[in-house]
Amino acid sequence: MKVNLGKQKRARVEMLPLIDIVFLLLIFFIYAMLSMVVNKGISVNLPFSSTAKIEEELPISVVVKENGDILLDDQNVLLEELGILLRLRVDKEKAPGLFLSSDKKVTCQRLINIMDKIREAGISKISLQTKENSN
């Protein structure tokens, strides 16, 4: 007995549903990466700014506490050591940036001295951390 199967159709891969799925996966991963932003730091009483914006690509963190102590990535350092340690980092990284957080009670002269050491180390991309003004 002969069974006539007729013309055999070729399998087709529809592109539109495939494109939709790829875009949905892309959106999912973008939102997942945005929610993974890690903020590590030491609590300081930051000054307010009405034009504050978030910088995300600056790897080095310098914190100046109310009593004038300097912390380089959670490690206490002296002002004289700061330039040397930052220079070592500049040699390892191409163009590092820096988060500079200072208590609002720290004197302007102390902050300027610290910024001078940072610039002497070859870092010109400095982000001063502030709180968003709640007005």
Image (tube, rainbow, N blue to C red):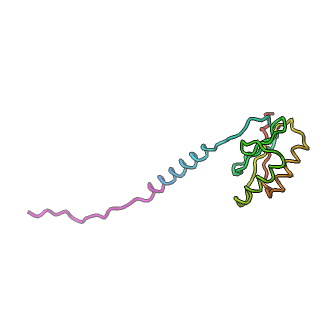
Lateral position of residue 27 relative to residue 48, left or right: left
State the residue in front, 88 or 26.
88
Residue span colored magenta:
1-20
State the residue in front, 49 or 108.
108
Question: Percent from the top left, x then y, of residue 97?
Answer: 74, 53
Question: Percent from the top left, x then y, of residue 9?
Answer: 28, 64
Question: Percent from the top left, x then y, of residue 13?
Answer: 38, 60
Question: Percent from the top left, x then y, of residue 27?
Answer: 55, 49
**Compared to 38, does 89 lie above or below?**
below
Lateral position of residue 100 relative to residue 36, left or right: right
Can residue 3 be found in the magenta stretch?
A: yes
Image quarter of the N terminus: bottom left
Image quarter of the C terminus: top right
**Compared to 52, does 11 lie above or below?**
below
Q: Quadrant of residue 106?
A: top right
**Compared to 41, does 98 lie above or below?**
below
Q: Residue furthest right?
A: 109
Lateral position of residue 128 relative to residue 23, left or right: right
Q: Quadrant of residue 75?
A: top right
Q: Residue furthest left?
A: 1
Q: Quadrant of residue 87?
A: bottom right
Residue occupying image coordinates x 70% and y 50%: 59
State the residue in front, 72 or 108.
72
State the residue in front, 79 or 103.
79
Q: Main secondary structure of the magenta part?
A: loop
Can residue 6 be found in the magenta stretch?
A: yes
Residue occupying image coordinates x 83% and y 55%: 119
Q: How many numbered discs? A: 0
